[in-house]
Image: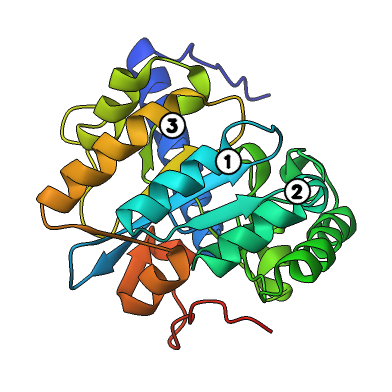
């Protein structure tokens, strides 16, 4: 009868097996990511100009949007406004003023809810419900969307893409909704939240024109004037994408035919 004696593994062998297991898991995850087709929204662009995309989100409020429109008109600047459809339905005159003054309308969804918590069917209903309202009120074809709270996953982007939308994120965050004070908002945009992160060519700036961001009214003129003095032009996202040779990150996949700015129907 043969007796088999099992030796207790040494700590060195345990460590080696642990390293091997880690490498295998990491490799598997990388391979899975490649073949699962991970999708990303557009955070920024590469442009052969000094153009920067200027955007405002609005989901509620009565006091902030109109003064911001006054500032943009005075400065001769056009932007993209991502609107929630209930706000747009409640403020048709402001939406129509945006269009008349050359601004672009994008979707900020219907309910202000994280779309990545919903099923694909529910996401589609949120997008199409908002689209019907926004297009009726604005007269523009709406094909840009910023997910509420910036919340996305593969199913959000895949569903939006199927409906002909591009999902737009941001690369420069003003953090105006935190009400840090006008000087902090200015600094967040011009110098960045982290060193070296200030607005530059091809970036997309996030502001809010909801009443949650009253500092924006005071900060915006300085931001615009400083960026102008540095040679930048501030434009809507549709125009920025029409100038772009690529978008970041690479998974955002700019189509070969760039998106033209929305035209009135």
For label 3, count other residues whose C-alpha is less than 10 Å away and answer few (under 14), some (14-19) or many (20+): many
Q: Give me the C-alpha separation between circle 1 and circle 3.
A: 9 Å
Task: Find disc 2 in the rendering and name its residue.
Answer: 91
Q: Is residue 231 rendered to the left or right of residue 209?
A: left
SS assignment at label 1: helix
Q: Nearer the viewer, residue 119 or 37?
A: 119
Task: Find disc 3 in the rendering and name its residue.
Answer: 217
Q: Give percent across and percent down for residue 1.
A: 68, 24
For label 2, count other residues whose C-alpha is less than 10 Å away and answer few (under 14), some (14-19) or many (20+): some
Q: Is residue 75 rendered to the left or right of residue 117?
A: left
Residue at the spot 17% in from the left edge and 42% down from the top edge: 226
Q: Are marks 1 and 2 in contact (CB under 8 Å)?
A: yes
Q: Nearer the viewer, residue 184 or 173?
A: 184
**Earlier residue among tags 1 and 3:** 1
User: Which image quarter is the C terminus in?
Assistant: bottom right
Asked if residue 213 is positioned above or below residue 249 in the image, the reply reads above
Task: Find disc 1 in the rendering and name its residue.
Answer: 65
How many marks do you count on the picture?
3
């Amino acid at each position: 009868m043969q007796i088999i004696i099992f030796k207790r593994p040494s700590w060195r062998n345990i460590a080696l097996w642990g390293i091997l297991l880690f490498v295998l898991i990491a490799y598997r995850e990388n391979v899975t990511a490649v073949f699962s087709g991970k999708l990303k929204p557009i955070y920024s662009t590469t442009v052969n100009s000094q153009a920067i995309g200027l955007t405002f989100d609005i989901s509620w409020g009565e006091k902030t949007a109109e003064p911001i429109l006054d500032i943009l008109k005075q400065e001769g600047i056009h932007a993209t406004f991502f609107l929630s459809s209930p706000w747009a339905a409640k403020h048709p005159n402001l939406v129509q003023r945006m269009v008349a003054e050359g601004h672009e309308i994008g979707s900020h969804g219907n309910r202000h809810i994280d779309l990545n918590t919903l099923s694909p069917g529910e996401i589609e209903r949120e997008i199409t419900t908002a689209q019907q309202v926004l297009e009726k009120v604005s007269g523009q074809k709406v094909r840009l969307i910023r997910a509420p709270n910036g919340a996305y996953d593969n199913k959000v982007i895949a569903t939006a893409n199927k409906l002909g939308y591009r999902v737009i994120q941001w690369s420069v965050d003003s953090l105006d909704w935190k009400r840090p004070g006008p000087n902090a908002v200015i600094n967040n945009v011009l110098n960045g939240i982290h060193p070296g992160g200030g607005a530059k060519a091809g970036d997309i700036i996030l502001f809010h024109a909801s009443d949650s961001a009253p500092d924006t009214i005071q900060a915006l003129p300085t931001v615009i004037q400083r960026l102008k003095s540095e040679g930048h032009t501030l434009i809507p996202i549709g125009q920025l994408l029409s100038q772009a040779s690529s978008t970041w990150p690479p998974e955002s996949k700019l189509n070969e035919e760039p998106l033209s700015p929305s035209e009135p129907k």
